[in-house]
Image: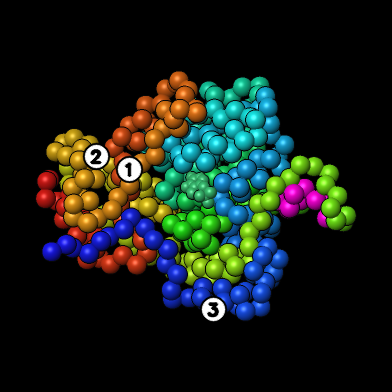
Amino acid sequence: MNKPFIPVSYPDLTGGNERKYLLDCFDSSWISSKGEYIRKFEYNFAKYIGVRFGVATSNGTTALHLAISALGLGKGDEVIVPNLTFVASANVVRYTGAKPVFVDVEKETWGMDPTTVEKAITKRTKAVMPVHLYGQPAAMGKLIDIANKHNLSIIEDAAEAHGAQVRIKDQESRIKRYKWRKVGSLGKAGCFSFYGNKIITTGEGGMVVTDDEKLAQKMRILRDHGQNPKKRYYHDVVGFNYRMTNMQAAIGMAQFERIEKLIVKKREIARCYEKYLKGINGIFLAPKLHWSKSVYWMYSVLIDSPYPKTRDEMMIILQKENIETRPFFYPVSKLPPYKQSGDFAQSIYLSAHGINLPSGTTLSEDDIKRVAKVFQKYQ
Ligand SMILES: *Cc1c(COP(=O)(O)O)cnc(C)c1O
């Protein structure tokens, strides 16, 4: 008899207004990219992150591309990107004609290593793109200092980290004071994805948030074919169609109403995994740092000796138990379109040893126990 399947993640669409708002679009026939839900979703999500403007897009990749396009990046420019990330972070830089320059990540956060960033800066460097991997914020305090010192824009890829927070220096305060800020609000622009498995979802969807009104305006124009907002069918620049539909925004708004609950659930899942996996030799738990609050998009661990099985062996063993997992991303510098040499020891290590465990928000403690039992069996 097969045990029930535990997927690595799945959208959690019940328990809120998702169905109601979606049907509202349908019944009122506001199904395209005009409609109230878009404005509402943009306004509320940006406010939640802690900035003034939200520009909703068709997905997280177009959000990133829109942000760096609006900054005017292109041929001859360089953008520093962590070597351990989903490929979209690098692709969007390439779309503009600019060059993604990869840097290693830190053992502590699994995110961009500030010391490697300093070394990678050249005259051509225009922007830095920290990625908050699997929900854990990168070392933003140090990265902001470096970006300020070298006059670089920070574009956060917060696709996996809606609601995650970092404690950073208050830039406005003259005395040294710290405050908690949400990721996505820490640079020039923050980009989010609402893909089906992200913290909140719209099916496909994304958003750029920013405090910069001019940048927001520019992104709105570029999102809509570069059309002059005062002159229909007059296009000052080459733009895109990166709009979100009202139906996506309707689901997004309903998901947004539950975002805090979903994050609490992710953190409970993390705590539960910690409880059952702690103390197993060779299983190294996800980062937990006093200056950050992860949202644990995917609860992840590293598997290394003295644990008797490798990451790849464990994935097969878990699969046989009807438990789905994912390996960490490949280092981008090893992918055919991006072959780059450099010292990428940490990204290579994490990529080979990291595993994403089931992290869907309707997971029960018994499900987690079942996963943990498989790990305990070989300890
Ligand atoms: C999901 C994701 C994206 C892309 O988002 P899509 O909505 O799938 O286009 C970009 N960067 C990271 C780190 C992601 O996890």
Q: Are marks 3 and 2 in contact (CB under 8 Å)?
A: no
Residue occupied by mark 2: 312
Name the residue at 31% across, 65% down. 363
Name the residue at 45% across, 20% down. 341
Q: Tell me which amino acid carries mark 3.
A: Lys
Q: Nearer the viewer, residue 164 or 235?
A: 235
Taking the magenta stretch, the answer to whether it contains residue 222 is yes
Range of magenta residues: 219-229
Residue 22 position within the rendered picture, expressed as x and y whole percent measured from the top left: 56, 73
Residue occupied by mark 1: 327
Q: Nearer the viewer, residue 114 or 122?
A: 122
Q: Are marks 1 and 2 in contact (CB under 8 Å)?
A: yes
As drawn, the label of residue 5 is none
Q: Determine whether 111 is above or below 275 in the image.
A: above
Q: Quadrant of the N terminus?
A: bottom left
Q: Determine whether 249 is above or below 106 in the image.
A: below
Instruction: Give the CA separation, mark 3 to mark 2.
Output: 43 Å
Residue 253 position within the rendered picture, expressed as x and y whole percent measured from the top left: 57, 69
> In the displayed structure, does residue 22 sit left or right of residue 68?
left
Badge 2 density bin: few <14, some 14–19, many ≥20, Cα 10 Å: some
